[in-house]
Amino acid sequence: MFGSGLGQGIPSLIPAVHTDFIFSAIGEELGLLGACAVIILYMCFVFRGLMIALAAKDDFTALLATGITSLMCLQTFIIIAGVIKLLPLTGVTLPFISYGGSSLVANFILLGLLLNISHEVNGQ
């Protein structure tokens, strides 16, 4: 339920733990509560992204915000479903958590675009 504790697990026994199976290492060390907390944070990200899309001023920015949010949601779903053996693993990284330089840069660029849309919505 609570895991083995932060830094107390043995993730070296899990293959490709720094890329594909990072969620299993989180589940091992932080337990069910930590894994659910990570999923809830991604759900909050998706909720806020869709709220930004609904409040967008024009159709293009609404579709862009929806696409960015859907991309992050799908990417998160694919990797978590792959870790729990619901889907086959595809090599997709978990956004903002998995090790992967180009994936991390691309995710931050997408987040910057979403923040720019949000900034324009708030009238500044």
Image: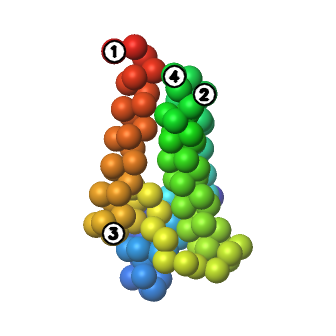
Q: Are marks 4 and 2 in contact (CB under 8 Å)?
A: no
User: Which amino acid, mark 2?
Assistant: Leu
**Image position of 64 with respect to 59: above or below:** below
CA separation in Å, label 1 and label 3: 34 Å
Q: Is residue 85 left or right of residue 104?
A: right
Residue at coordinates 38% horizontally, 40% vertically from top-left? 113
User: Which amino acid, mark 3?
Assistant: Gly
Residue at coordinates 59% horizontally, 58% vertically from top-left? 74
Judged by depth in the image, the label closer to the viewer, 1 or 3, is: 1
Secondary element at image label 2: helix
Dot 1: few (<14), some (14–19), or many (≥20) neighbours within 10 Å? few
Q: Are marks 3 and 4 in contact (CB under 8 Å)?
A: no
Residue at coordinates 33% horizontally, 15% vertically from top-left? 124
Judged by depth in the image, the label closer to the viewer, 3 or 2, is: 2
Position in image of residue 57 (x %, y %): 51, 22
| Disc number for residue 124 | 1
Q: Label 3: which residue?
A: 100
Judged by depth in the image, the label closer to the viewer, 1 or 4, is: 4
Q: Label 4: which residue?
A: 57
Dot 4: few (<14), some (14–19), or many (≥20) neighbours within 10 Å? some
User: Which amino acid, mark 4?
Assistant: Lys
CA separation in Å, label 3 and label 2: 31 Å
Position in image of residue 121 (x %, y %): 45, 21
Name which of mark 1 and mark 4 comes first in the sequence: 4
Name which of mark 1 and mark 2 comes first in the sequence: 2
Position in image of residue 31 (x %, y %): 56, 60
Position in image of residue 52 (x %, y %): 53, 29
Judged by depth in the image, the label closer to the viewer, 3 or 4, is: 4
Residue 101 figure quarter: bottom left
Name which of mark 3 and mark 4 comes first in the sequence: 4
Secondary element at image label 1: loop
Q: Label 2: which residue?
A: 54
